[in-house]
Amino acid sequence: MKSGGMFGKPRSGDQVWVKICGITNETDALAAIEAGADALGFNLVRQSKRYIEIEKSATWIDNLPTKTCKVAVMADPNWEDACRISYLPFIDALQLHGNESPEFCRRLAEAGIPFAKAVPVTASKSLADLPNYFTDTMILDSRVGGAFGGTGKPFPWKFAPEFLRHHPGITVILAGGLNPENVAEAVSVVRPRGVDVTTGVEVSPGKKNASLIRAFIEAARRP
């Protein structure tokens, strides 16, 4: 794994990498793992409906299989918090989902902290002049109103393929409004390395549905 990057290999060959985000409890975590998820996301943003107190959840997260990547989702953390969370033994990487500066990202990369940077996609130009965030893993997500991530609304996928063509060294993860009904089309249009879902496999914020998780992963990896 490159410094600044986030990913291990998917469980099988070159299949689409899948992250189930907004995990709030052990039952949903185990259901996602059983369905074949490569990674789980834990939301540490206090304003989120899926926020968890990581210290109170430490025991059950630490007991999850080590083969599954555990990602801490943060938005505009200070340096001390980013380091503290990244050094937890059961956290494998950070996902930065705020307005983190390139300088902040550079410091993380130099410290050897694996992370992905999420960026909002609102138009083709929103991907045209992105700064160097010093990571090989970027998450393309939706912004709806003032909400960034977890909105359940997709952005126009037509904006993404050009970004992939111009950044062949970047691992691109597609997020934003994905669900079992549209993820196969999204993968076909964008050809991302992976997909990231929150709302699309929930029955309510923070509560996943095992059947939807299985359907999502099967659709994402459909030949």
Image (tube, rainbow, N blue to C red):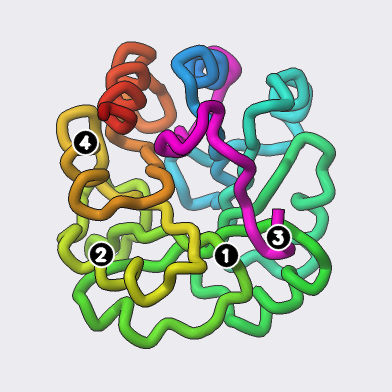
Give 156 or 100, whichever is nearer the viewer: 156
Above or below, comparing residue 82 to residue 207 in the picture: below
- Which image quadrant for residue 180? top left
Q: Alpha-carbon distance for marks 1 and 2?
A: 17 Å
Q: What residue type is disc 4 on?
A: Ala
Counting other residues with Cα less than 10 Å from the Cα at mark 3, is it few (<14), some (14-19), or many (20 or more)?
A: some
Give the crowd class for mark 2: few <14, some 14-19, many >=20 residues within 10 Å.
some
Label 1's element? loop
Q: Which residue is mark 1?
A: 136
Q: Which residue is mark 3?
A: 2
Of the numbered discs 3 and 1, the one sitting upstream in the chain is: 3
Q: Are marks 3 and 4 in contact (CB under 8 Å)?
A: no
Task: Give the spatial CA distance, label 2 vs label 3.
Answer: 23 Å
Label of residue 184 in the image = 4
Residue 161 numbered tag: 2
Mark 4 secondary-structure assignment:
helix
Q: Nearer the viewer, residue 4 or 23?
A: 4
Which contiguous range is marked in magenta? 1-27
Residue shown at 66% from the left, 84% from the top: 103
